[in-house]
Each structure stands twice: as structure tokens, then as C-alpha cells.
Amino acid sequence: MSEVDGNGTAGQNAGAMAPGLWLSQRITDDCNGLNASAWILWQVIDKHVCAAGYNGKKDSGMVDMTKGFWGTAVADHDKNEIVLSKKYYCFGQYTRYIRPGMTMLNSAGNTLTAYDKDNDQLVIVAYNTSSGKSDMRFDLSQFDECGTSAKVIRTSNYENWADAGKININNSSLSVSLEPNSVTTYIVDGVKGGKALTGKIAVNSANVTGSDPWKNDTNNTCKKVFDGSTSTFFDGVGNGWVQADLGESYSLTALGFAPRSGYEYRCEGGRFLISDDGSNWKELYTVKSQPTGGMNYITKLPENISGRYIRYEVPDGTPPNGKDSTYCCNIAEIELYGQPTGMTSLEALAPVKVSGSAPYKDSSDDCSKAFDGSNSTFFDGVGSGWVKADLGGICSLDAIGYCPRKGYEYRCLDGEFFTSMDGLNWDKVGSISGVPSFSTNYINLADKDIRARYVMYKVPDGAPANTVNPDSVYCCNIAEIGIYGKLEGLNGDVDGNGRYEVADLVLTQKFLLGAGDLDKWENADLNADKRVDAFDLVLLRQLIVSK
């Protein structure tokens, strides 16, 4: 958000703080509402004092600091000094502590929040435009770790960047009282957290049920809660609820929810529940205070929580918001993250090498993107495309996970997965029979006794043999692949030094000639036939040459 300024004021009988409070409102609203990556003031100095005139006799003169003015300071050329205003100090409450590279967090109202992951520091800036004190509580419970106190820096009519001491943090909650017409920065050290949101669960709208919307408006039904948009909403009323059948049991790692814009207060007191059978419910999370606008993510859920059904409901009776006579079930969106219950104990295997066909137009979206740990990147392969992972040794495989490229999920239909011991001879272990959701989907291999060193994903040749793919040829588009199982031994690492090389080839050859023993003969059994022979020697030579 660039080149911002103006001559506005804010506050109640705020005096010299009025322009600074106005500037604080602009910074906070712009960063929270627009997700700005930078916020840039028009110019620090706009007004000049000079008896002889300045810059072509443009002498704007000293300003009334209690009224709106451009800039944050005045250049007095007669006295050769800079006159700093309260607007300047209010600006500094943000710029001195929220620094480039920090992550802006979702905030609402009069609060701006940023997180410095490198230094484990949280910065909260809040302003108060009233003539009396304003109490606030910041919920820090979703961080994995949090300090015990917050350092306080404040600007008001009688303070400039004043050190106002420290406030204790109790039960992951920071309760503060903002001074009248003030801007305050709170710095919390020792903050760690931020679980990655992986494994988004796709919810079929046909499996979403709920109470009736207000006046039976068919435009704002419960199905809007899972339509992927925070701009639509369920306009439920008293005793309202919405429920989703996930189709199978999932172990949840996180949930996200967005209140209806402008009615965030109606989510306070709302409860998320989980059930195995849709009848007996366990509490998942309760919204204890008014949430911020947009998506709110909850990553600290009860341990080992799982279920097939998710429900959001509001309590009975009158809420404390002072606006409604009864709790209203207003919610815009719900997101769920986790894995099918049977997949939670899987051990991920990291490839030692990834190879594949060329990307579309030799772009940077190459095959390595399929194993970079992010569903937001993708391999943009074209016809007859493939991507192969070398696991570095013989592995017993439990499952393969995959996520399609977002917006191109149909390109995964008919895609196939293969495994191999030697990288030459392949066995098909699974195929994608329907259009997958943009989330992690799984192929369960646990009961198939599959051992392999290599895993390959490829699409068929030619034109798609289905009615949902509009392309003229199968395109190898995939965002992420995960391989799960256990490494049984480093294939080819005969001497046990953690790598396969010429020395292993020499040891194997000597063994076959009767001139030595192999302590780790299993690693020399590359074709897994329970013996070491010339066929294994040839395969080991191929491995070393292809490194």
C-alpha cells in the first residue's frame, strides 16, 4: 500500500494525538484488510517553516499539531531543526517494531500483529481512540510456546515511545488496558508455533446438512459453509447448526473457520464437535471470544482426536454481545485438515534423488516440485510425463499420498503409480480412478507386502480416455507426492558407510569370486531374491554409473 497520507484526525478530545490516531487507523485497516506486503508513507516531512521562503518561496508554515496535516514532522529552516509530532511517534509504534520479513497475522479491529519466526517474537500494536481506558484480551493459546510477559511501549498525549514496563501473560492470555487516545506496542519473546496446514480434507456438499437459514433464504444455506469462499455464508438463526459427513474417520490436525463478515461477534460461544457415528459428540474447540475477520486457524486440538462427522453449533439463550437477543449461527466457511485415521502412524520416506520428464516449455515447475513438501507448487509435466523417486534403499511401502495441481485436478484421473527394485522393471501398485480433491489423497499399500527402492508416477500416452479431461493429451500435472513406509537397508551399501560406491562393487565382486565375506549381504541383494549373484553385481554397477 504505497504513498499513503492525509489530513485526517481521530479520537475523542485527543489533542495532538488526533492525527497520529488517524494514521494508526489507516495502517491497521490497510494491512489487515488488504494483506499489504508493505505500507509506505507518502513523505515524512511535508511542512516547512522559513522566513525567506523555501523551495520556490513555498513556505507552508508551522501547523496546528492538533489538527490534520500531511507528513509526520515539520522542517524549521530558520532554527535548523526538525519538529516531531505525535503523528511521528504513533508511526514509530509500528515501524520500529514490525520489521521487514516478519509474518503478518490475521487481526481485527484496532490491532495489528506480526510474528518474527527467526527470533521467536510476537509484536502486537493496538490503538485506543476513546477518552477512557479500553480493556482487551489477546488469546495466544494457538502458539506452541509463549513467553511469560510482554514488554510495553506506548505513545499518548503525555508519552513518546515510553517504556511502560511489562505485563504478565497468564494461561496463554495477555490482558491489557489501553490508555485513552493512545497507541501501544506489546512485544512477547519466546513465541514458537505455527503448525503447517497440510492434508486439507475435501468435503462433498451433498454430505453437508444443517438447520434452516433465516427466512428460509435458499441463497444462504448451510452448504455455503463448505463452498471454499469466505464471501458466502450460512445465515443460521437461534439453535442453528451445520454438520459435515467426511465419508470416513479422520484424525484432525487443524481446523479453520471464517465468521460472516461484519458479524464476527456472532461466532463467540460457537462450538465445534466431532463424532464417530453422528449421534455421540465430543468437543473439538469452542470460540471463547470474538474472532477476527477472515480465516481463523486452530492448530492445537485435543490429542488423538478423530471422527467421521464434524458439527458447528451455537448455544441456546442470549449472547453477551449486546446486539442479538439469541445466539445466531452465522458462519462463512469451515476448513478441516488431517489424515484418514488409518494413515496417521505412517512414516514418510525422503527420496535421495528425484528425476522425471521435462516440464512444459522448460519452466521452473519441474519434477522436483512433486517432492518439495508443498501442495502450492507443482510439476507441470506434459504428454507421456513421469516423475520418479529413488528412496536410496529397499523399503517396505505402506502407502503413497498424492495431491493434484490445484485447478487441474482432472489431469490426475487415470494416472498410475509403479514400484521397482532396480529402476528398470516396474510393477503397477495403484491408479487414480476418479477426479481427486485438491488435498492429500492416499493409496493404501499396507496389506500388499510391497518392497521397492523406486516409486514412479506417470500418466498414460495419447488422448484422455475419460469424459472429464478436456486436454488433447494426458498431462503429468501433480503438486505433491508422499511415500510412506520403512527403510529396510541402503541398497548397494555393502560396507555400511551410508552410501553405495565403487568400493561396494569391489567387495561384492570379491565375494562372488570367493575372496571375501559380506557383513551386509542383504544390501547386495539388489533383485531381492534372497541371494547375491552376478545379477546383483550388474545391477549395482548400473546404480553406481547412474549416480
Image (spheres, grey):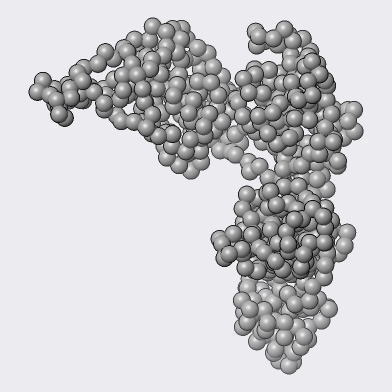
Residue 547: image x %, image y %? Answer: 61, 76
Name which quarter of the figure residue 27 lies in. top left
**Residue drawn at point x = 19 percent, y = 18 percent:** 61
**Residue drawn at point x = 48 percent, y = 35 percent:** 36
Q: Is residue 507 visible?
A: yes
Between 75 and 235, the one nearer to me in the picture:
235
Residue 232: image x %, image y %? Answer: 69, 28
Q: Is residue 156 above or below residue 48?
A: above
| Number of numbered discs overlaid on the protein picture | 0
Q: Is residue 30 above or below residue 323?
A: below
Between 134 and 24, the one nearer to me in the picture:
24
Between 3 and 446, the one nearer to me in the picture:
3
Residue 402: image x %, image y %? Answer: 73, 54
Q: Is residue 158 visible?
A: no
**Residue drawn at point x = 83 percent, y = 48 percent:** 342
**Residue drawn at point x = 70 percent, y = 66 percent:** 383
Name which quarter of the figure residue 417 lies in. bottom right
Name which quarter of the figure residue 499 lies in. bottom right
Residue 59: image x %, image y %? Answer: 17, 22
Q: Is residue 246 above or below residue 451?
A: above
Q: Is residue 210 above or below residue 500?
A: above
